[in-house]
Image (cartoon, grey):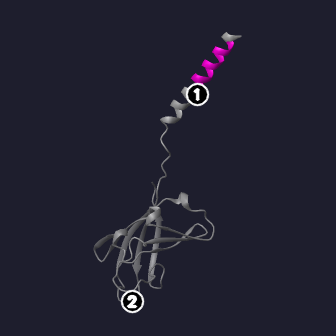
């Protein structure tokens, strides 16, 4: 009887030790960022004839896909855009670190709110004469 109890206790101890070893060395799963490339072709206004390119990356695991949602710098949003032959990142947004923001409606991208001009913030994404082509990048 004592021998069976000692064997049972040893088995439990070994099981606990192996379980701890197995889960102690497991690395957390890292989310793969979602990246989109975009091209803006300006067809109207003072910048007509210009084309701007850029990309943005974000972690889509924070989205629930219902209603209006935003991803910002605190959520890991990264932005890169070439505008008039100069490269800008999220840190050049006029209102950084509160902006830029990526706005979604029911899980679909609606617009990137990224503003690099010193004047009042405006919505350029999707405005008439600013044709945007959005392409998901294979990660």
- Residue 137 location in percent, x, y? 45, 59
Name the residue furthest left. Answer: 85
- Is any atom of residue 36 visible in this view? no
Residue at screen point 41% across, 75% down: 114
Disc 2 designates what residue?
45
Q: Is residue 49 left or right of residue 16?
A: left
Magenta region: 4-16
Nearest the camera: 88 or 85? 88
Q: Is residue 92 left or right of residue 12?
A: left
- Residue 88 location in percent, x, y? 32, 71
Disc 1 designates what residue?
16
Residue at screen point 33% across, 83% down: 118
Nearest the camera: 86 or 27? 27
Q: Secondary structure at mark 1?
A: helix
Q: Secondary structure at mark 2?
A: loop
User: Does the stretch in magenta take in 24?
Assistant: no
């Amino acid at each position: 009887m004592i021998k069976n109890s000692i064997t049972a206790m040893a088995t439990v101890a070994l099981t606990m030790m192996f379980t701890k070893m197995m889960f102690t060395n497991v690395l957390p799963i890292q989310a793969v960022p979602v990246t989109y490339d975009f091209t803006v072709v300006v067809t109207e206004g003072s910048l007509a004839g210009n084309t701007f390119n850029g990309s943005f990356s974000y972690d889509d695991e924070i989205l629930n896909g219902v209603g209006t949602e935003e991803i910002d710098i605190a959520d890991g949003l990264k932005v890169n855009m070439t505008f008039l032959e100069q490269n800008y990142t999220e840190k050049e947004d006029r209102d950084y670190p509160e902006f830029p923001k990526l706005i979604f409606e029911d899980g679909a991208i609606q617009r990137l709110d990224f503003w690099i001009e010193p004047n009042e913030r405006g919505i350029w994404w999707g405005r008439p004469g600013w044709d945007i082509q959005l392409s998901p990048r294979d990660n």
